[in-house]
Amino acid sequence: MKEKKLTFGLPKGSLQENSLLFLRKAGFTVNVAPRVCQPKIDDPEINCFLLRAQEIPKYVSLGKLDAGIAASDWIFEQKAKVKEVCNLDFAKKTIGNVARWVLAVPRDSSVKTVSNLQGKTVASEVVEITKNYLRKKGVKAKVEFSWGASEAKPPLFADAVVDITETGESLRVNNLRVIDDVFESRTKFIASPQAWKDSWKREKIETMAMLIGGCVKSHQMTNIMAHIHKQQLNDILLLVQKYGFPAIKKIAETDYFSVFFRCQNGQERDLIPILKRAGCQGIVQSRAFKIG
């Protein structure tokens, strides 16, 4: 009987570090040796391939890869027909945020809105996304493919650029000004339509997506545990209801309950003082590691 295998595409480049981070957090041991494009993974049912992020949607769409991690910009750009299994909200530098393709011009440019680009030149790596955006805006402009370093193109080589940004820092240091958002790109776990129809592959894909997706979510979460006296329980729960529904467990042979909150990173700055002032005891903060 032929051994069952799942072919999986890992993005090389900007998404590589965080993709490997969350694969490892999900329990997979992945070794990427220099210049090796087939990383070793400790699951004998998975064959990993390290490929350019731009290529993964195409190969998944064609069924040459069963699944992979890809960004929605390249899914759109490649016109790839794939199954989007789940969002993995990480980008190159940040986790929990999305990357944006933006329309930018030199800071001293006379261009104030996209309509001012009528008949002008726009440079971008994402030609289809840019053309689609301009078409929706009713603007006829020349769109030139850029191999990268798009920030250097205006004003000599292009009147404007459509470039990707997370923090806006690269645009600022290159003296560019954003005039509009063009496309919001999310990292996704994708599968080929062919693999999705195969029951064994689908189960394998869903399991990987659940584990990796849970780790991405948990990276953005904090656990707070507190002991609350039974007489205070209802009042305190009303006080903190905007933080969601906690898990509650009676502490044996006492008048106290353990209350367990899971909140977004940063919310603990508000939640812990509220709990403390309300009379809670034994407050403990810990990192969330995985969410199923």
Image (cartoon, rainbow, N blue to C red):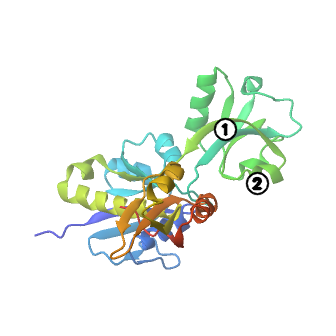
Residue drawn at (73%, 23%), measured in percent from left and top?
Answer: 115
Q: Is residue 204 visible?
A: yes
Tag 2 residue: 169
Q: Nearer the viewer, residue 7 or 238?
A: 238
Q: Quadrant of the N terminus?
A: bottom left
Does 186 appear above or below 210?
Answer: above
Q: Is residue 2 above or below residue 85?
A: below
What's the distance in space between the residues labelled 1 and 2, CA to CA?
24 Å
Q: Secondary structure at mark 1?
A: strand
Point out residue 138 in the picture as x, y percentages from the top left corner: 64, 20
Q: Quadrant of residue 2?
A: bottom left
The amino acid at mark 2 is Glu
Please give left or right for residue 44 compared with residue 262 in the image. Answer: left
Q: Earlier in the sequence, mark 1 or mark 2?
A: 1
Asked if residue 63 lies left or right of residue 172, the reply is: left
Q: Say which of marks 1 and 2 sits in front.
A: 2
In the rendered image, the residue lying farthest to the top is: 138
The residue nearer to you, when weighing 272 against 152, is: 272
